[in-house]
Image (cartoon, rainbow, N blue to C red):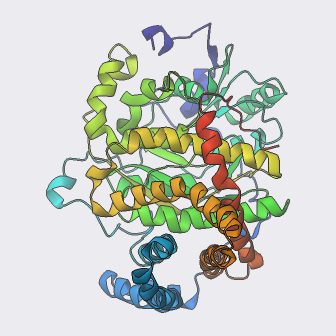
Amino acid sequence: MSAAYMGRKDPGAGAVSAPQRLGSHGSGPGQSVLTRPKPAPPPLPPLRSARPQRPGAVRRWLDRMDPDTRYDARRVLTLICLLPLLLILARGAPALLEDPLLMSYGFTVLLGTITMFYLAYTRYDDPSERPMRKRPKARDLESFPALPTTPRVSFLLAVKDEVENIESCVRSMATSDYPDLQVVVVDDLSEDGTQDVLRRLEAELGITVIYLKKNLGKKGALVRACEVAHGDIIAMTDSDCFLAPDALGRCVRALVDHPELGAVSGHARALNAGFSFWTKAQDVWFEGQFRVAKATESTFGRVTCVSGPLAVFRRDAIFNYLPAWANDRFMGAPFRFSTDRQLTGYVLGQKWKGQELKRKYADSPFVTRRDYPEREWRVGYVYSAKVWTNAPPRFRPLMKQQIRWKKSFVRNLCFTGTFMWRMGLGPATLYYGHVLWVTAAPFMAFRHMIWAPAQGAAFLTLLYLCGIILKGCAYGLAFKIDNPGDARWIYRPAMGLLSTLLLAWLLPYSLATIRRGVWSRSAT
């Protein structure tokens, strides 16, 4: 990336259309905050997941305890809830010793599920509400520079052909209740009327809009936004998302209170949850992926994917690696997926990969402007930072989404997988265990659904399906506990069956077509 690409108007890529008269949204560092009255935030979506929920009696009782007592109480309550799964595990242990080849897969999956539930519900604390339990030692904590009490935030968005969603997304960004905010939107050569909407919002909200003359793709567009972003914190969202007014502020609070965190992820649910069977199933699935999977990783400070709906980074944790991100190549071709996973990998792995990446782009202004030290940053997850994203509403776009995600999984494995073993036993076991599960899924599906019936072992097929449903029911009941009154928990076992029996087969296809793909946020 040349010096001309950063810091000056580039007629080949696009022009910044946000005059300095707009106060904080178009001003430089140190200038005054936006003085015009801030518009009222748009109403929250009419979803059950968007309704304020008063903490239940058990939660209020736990919150009144001191940290150590609360931790012990949560352990007891969680073990009681997990008791049925523990009994099934104990009941199957003798069979594992008798036939380890047959029983090892199901036993390992069940043990992993129990472990994740235990960690997520006993050790996870929302870092915007109270200190995380597992933090660096005081001596190591001093090596992380503290952020200002109210750091400047640059909120970035790349958009292409999202005329139906872009206004609600941008309004939810610009009306966030965070006080010192710069909003930068990059239009990546939209052709459906998105630019007209952005011009109107630009004049009304005082945001910065960059209209590209050449398509750069999502990563390239976001890096273009970073050229004019001057916040201590760089936040990003997707163009089909809608944020709660306090979501950004909660993520910022987590970073301020925990200097060791280089990035945090918000909590996403489906914006179109009631549209179809597919969106209902994904909404429940999203809840589990964040509340259980990301919460488990967060207990170690090693969340491996700061998800696109709300990704919030410290500037000093990513700035030097933006050219590597924008120009990422894999198997000899530009790689346009893995936007959130790969950038998270740069935060987690810069202690081991940072110098090499900076040398590769040593002439980039993102490196020469300021060389930030490589640090062993941690990455967290903020459960209370709510954001809603449009899930694919039909079967075909769902398949396209899953193929993109699996390509990202493969690419990220070849980067993050090279250093996760250095992170300690817990994070390494979670990461490589997940890799093993995803890799083995198509082989297990073939063995149990095709080979076993052909060999007359229908009982093995039945046992396999029962295991999938059992795991789905466990996640469904966790959803029910976290979302009282929401009867959609039943979609979680259905999503488990869909994932194991159909989506698992997409991994070989994604690997075979990994060099093919075009960026688009459209879910239609």
Query: Residue visible at 68% across and 82% down?
Result: 484
User: Taking 109 as reference, is 320 above or below it?
Assistant: above
Q: Is residue 67 above or below residue 211?
A: below
521 vs 444, left or right, is right
Residue 352, percent across and down? 26, 38
- Which residue is nearer to you in this view: 409 or 253? 409
**Would you place residue 155 above or below residue 89 in this image?**
above
Residue 367's quadrant in the figure? top left
The residue lying at 38 percent from left, 55 percent from top is 302
Place of residue 461 in the rendered image (x, y in percent of width and height, measured from the top left)? 66, 73
Instruction: Describe residue 20's horizontal placement relative to residue 41 as left or right.
Output: left
Image x and y of residue 28, in percent: 47, 26
Query: The N terminus appears in which quarter of the rendering?
Result: top left
Quarter of the image with the C terminus is: top right
Residue toward you, 168 or 162:
162
Residue at position x 34%, y 26% in the image? 357
Q: Residue at x 35, y 36 (%)?
A: 316
Would you say residue 320 is visible in this rendering?
Answer: yes
Residue 234 appears in the figure: no
Residue closest to the eye, 24 or 1: 1
Residue 522 position within the rendered picture, expressed as x and y whole percent measured from the top left: 76, 39
Front-lying residue, 292 or 467? 467
Left/right placement of residue 386 relative to residue 227 reads right
